[in-house]
Amino acid sequence: MQEITDKLEQGVKEIFESDQFKEYLSTMSKFYDYSINNSMLIFLQKPDASHVAGFRAWEKKFDRHVIKGQKGLKIIAPTKFKVLEKENKTDPKTGKPVIGSDGKPVKETVEKEMIGYHTVTVFDVSQTYGKELPEIPMSMLSGKVPNYKRFFDALEKVSPVPIDFETIEGSANGYYSFADKRIAIKKDMSEAQTIKTTIHEISHAKLHDLDLKTTEDKQKLPYDKQTREVQAESVAYCVCQHYGLDTSSYSFGYVAGWSSGKETAELKASLNVIRKTAAEIITDVDAQIATLNMEQTQESEKAPGLIENKDTFSIYQLTDKATEKYGFISLNSLRADGVAVDPANYRYLYNGEFPKDKTLEDIYVRFNLYRPENFIGHSLSVSDVIVTQRDGMEKAYYVDRFGFTEVPDFMTLLQEQRQTPINPLETAEKSTEQNYNMIDGQINNTPTVDELEKRAKAGETISITEIIKANKADKARAASKDEKRPSIRAQLKKDKQSVARGERPAQQPKQNNKEREV
């Protein structure tokens, strides 16, 4: 994560140094900085307004003209005026009132400047024409995203509020509605821009809506507008970078535009928040993608690797942990080290039909050059396993440096695995423990997110990988606790059996469901 945020900081600094951005800042300084009340008035009359100025200001300062027939926006402006008032005259030496011959204070007429308020009319840039305003040096993202539908489905499940597509007027690509608790994304954008914008708005919902936050977070001071935008875009940039989507051409300019200066104070002050939120989203997206893959598998298969009455193939690839040890190694090298090709080290990723006229080589070409959209693994390569089923017979093949080698042991172990109930705790441990020797029924050697936060506050640099692992470990710990707690039905059944045997039911400790006041 440190590497990603360093790259973000450097990219934003380079934007500040560009001539285009200097011209942009020079122009923006000519716009009046409106009060909160006037900003609200503008928003209520024209929600998509971006830059507003008076009729004459557009002509004199920006060489633009209001389009005929446009309805102006009403705001309140201060105005100065002078009045004459009578006051007690004071002695300049003593500062005391001057007393007249009649014994009363002498009065004098004084001119005073007063401030009042009146209604004025302004117009948004969209209501004018003429010389183009300089823009922040950033460009809309283009191009497709691998497994776009699966990725977006996962984001929808991760989002704390509903996501809708709609037509949005003006330059905004999306927005988060604090009142309606929903996210709106502009229709017809590229896949890359849609994904980036969606993560940006999810970040707003997670970080900036006090209604969705915990009591502890609600007590913290709310962020200003600049910081909110810097945080949301920075989180979007980090998450996209993690998944191989480069948004720098847009994100660098966006963060620079919302920063108060080239020192990027908002970004620097928010690095821990950005890292933590990005890690949470990545962890949740990974979990949702895994769930979606499992659901697809259950729908398309009677058993792993089998489609009824059809010849099929299935693809297995090493888990992240196993890849560190055995990834991209030839079968001969594994066997020389006494390592078996074990399904326990693999994850099932894909199943499809395998027509008689197709070969393993055809599968290899397809999953390197024309990968299906719903396949989330990497290109087929050394250490992957292809399981085929033809005429009711299953065989497993190791993708080797040259060609494919049958691995009967993998097939035997896989068939045994299918008949063995999955232990969720062991699965959780394998994804979090540093080595399999630590599998003991307790997930105990990965720090919690709270522990990492304390280390970060103490000045230690925490990587995004550590935060993701801590998130997974926390969830696995919670799952293991839930698993160990007997259900009410199971406990009643156990007590009934004890009574039938003439035994006294064991007394269960009472569960404390409330926090006590002390």
Image (cartoon, rainbow, N blue to C red):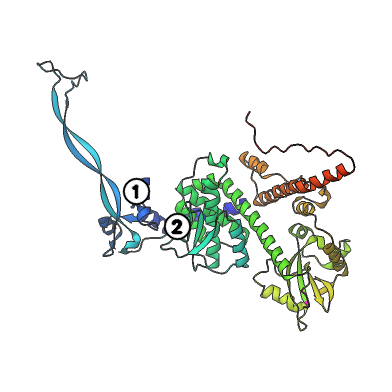
Question: Is 30 placed left or right of 377 in the picture?
Answer: left
447 relative to 23, above or below: above
Q: Amino acid at mark 2?
A: Ser
Position in image of residue 151 (x %, y %): 61, 63
| Quadrant of the rendered image containing residue 91 | top left
| Quadrant of the rendered image containing residue 112 | top left
Contact (Cβ within 8 Å) of mark 2 with mark 1: no
Q: Amino acid at mark 1?
A: Asn
Question: Which element type, helix, strand or loop, lies under badge 1?
Answer: helix
* Nearest the eye: 496 or 14: 496
Question: Is 424 placed left or right of 176 in the picture?
Answer: right
Q: Which residue is mark 2?
A: 18
8 relative to 101, above or below: below
Q: Residue furthest bottom?
A: 357
Position in image of residue 128 (x %, y %): 31, 62
Whole-angstrom CA distance, mark 2 to mark 1, is 32 Å
Q: Which residue is mark 1?
A: 38
Per the rendered image, the range of residues in magenta is: 307-311
